[in-house]
């Protein structure tokens, strides 16, 4: 039994749905850009009427909102929110599937180690996330070139888009930890939504405080910094990578040692 291919096939439908959802959000938001760019002065005046705290919470940068990358960085926060839910859902699902569906007795009596079972599941989930990002990236670049009203930095656009993958990997790893520690998860989507929105709200409420950035993956990537420096902040990039590696390794260790019951 090839667990990797089986799991990849099992994720096929959800991967397609989430990918199409991300692309639909992209098209919906980016289709507004040509109209907004024509009335950018009035739009900026409208945004300037918002309190500074509200603008920071919503990720609005008045100075750059008129450029394609500036507008994209604003709407991309909500695309990332959707992608984070997909990744969290995958992470929690693969760690609790056998208990929820009561298939542990069948799977664990096969001549295959737990480590191989979970690593195959993780690899299949990561493949699904990677495929989502490849299709999204191609779609995003295509849409950006269609709606642009002037030339823009493709390098910056690519760096902003790539943060979706990093954020999804972090959320996936956190989901894995949740699944192996709290294995009796009855509703994956409910837990996924709760955890992701909690991180999102922390990011919005604490947008003005630098210290809160360490507590929510949604603030690890500052789009203004990316546009100004055409690079990521190494402190948060390394923090994210460490969080991913430590979470995945810890999940594998706990899953390999814990007693798994079917009831």
Image (cartoon, rainbow, N blue to C red):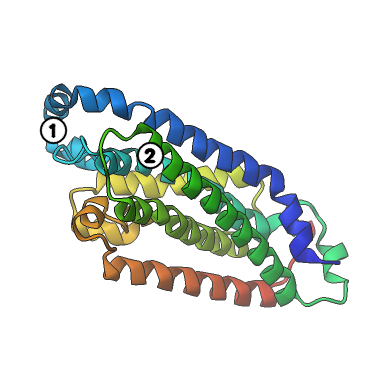
Q: Quadrant of residue 60?
A: top left
User: Which one is nearer the viewer's eye here, 234 or 247?
Assistant: 234
Q: Residues within 10 Å of mark 2 (few under 14, many from 20)?
A: many
The quarter of the image holding the N terminus is bottom right
Q: Residue at x 23, y 39 (%)?
A: 67
Q: Which mark is residue 51?
A: 1
User: Which one is nearer the viewer's eye here, 185 or 7?
Assistant: 7
SS class, disc 2: helix
User: Which one is nearer the viewer's eye here, 87 or 197?
Assistant: 87
Vertical order, 221 against 257 (above or below)? above
Q: Residue at x 84, y 65 (%)?
A: 107
Vertical order, 104 against 76 (above or below)? below
Q: Is residue 217 visible?
A: yes
The quarter of the image holding the C terminus is bottom right
Q: Which mark is residue 94?
A: none
Q: Residue at x 34, y 52 (%)?
A: 160
Q: Is residue 187 visible?
A: no
Q: Quadrant of residue 111?
A: bottom right
Residue marked by disc 2:
144
Mark 1 or mark 2, which is nearer the start of the sequence? Answer: 1
Tell me where residue 210 appears, x and y as whole percent: 20, 57
Horizontal arrangement in the rendering, residue 96 relative to residue 226 (left or right):
right
Q: Nearer the viewer, mark 2 or mark 1?
A: 2
Vertical order, 68 against 44 (above or below)? below
Q: Residues within 10 Å of mark 1 (few under 14, many from 20)?
A: few
């Amino acid at each position: 039994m090839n667990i990797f291919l089986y799991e990849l096939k099992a994720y096929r439908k959800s991967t397609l749905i989430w990918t199409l959802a991300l692309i639909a959000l992209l098209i919906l938001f980016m289709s507004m850009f040509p109209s907004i760019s024509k009335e950018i002065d009035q739009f900026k005046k409208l945004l300037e009427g918002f309190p500074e705290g509200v603008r920071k919470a919503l990720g609005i940068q008045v100075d750059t909102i008129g450029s394609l990358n500036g507008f994209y960085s604003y709407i991309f926060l909500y695309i990332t929110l959707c992608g984070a839910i997909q990744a969290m859902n995958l992470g929690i699902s693969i760690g609790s599937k056998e208990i929820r569906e009561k298939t542990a007795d069948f799977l664990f009596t096969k001549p295959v180690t737990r480590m191989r079972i979970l690593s195959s599941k993780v690899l299949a989930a990561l493949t699904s996330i990677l495929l989502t990002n490849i299709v999204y990236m191609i779609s995003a670049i295509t849409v950006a070139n269609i709606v642009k009203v002037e030339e823009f930095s493709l390098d910056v656009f690519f760096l902003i888009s790539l943060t979706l993958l990093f954020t999804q990997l972090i959320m996936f790893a956190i989901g894995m930890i949740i699944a192996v520690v709290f294995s009796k998860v009855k509703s994956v989507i409910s837990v996924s939504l709760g955890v992701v929105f909690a991180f999102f709200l922390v990011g919005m409420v604490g947008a003005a405080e630098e210290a809160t950035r360490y507590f929510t993956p949604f603030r690890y990537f500052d789009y203004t910094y990316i546009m100004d420096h055409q690079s990521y902040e190494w402190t948060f990039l390394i923090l994210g990578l460490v969080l991913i590696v430590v979470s995945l390794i810890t999940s594998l260790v706990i899953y390999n040692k814990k007693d798994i019951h079917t009831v």
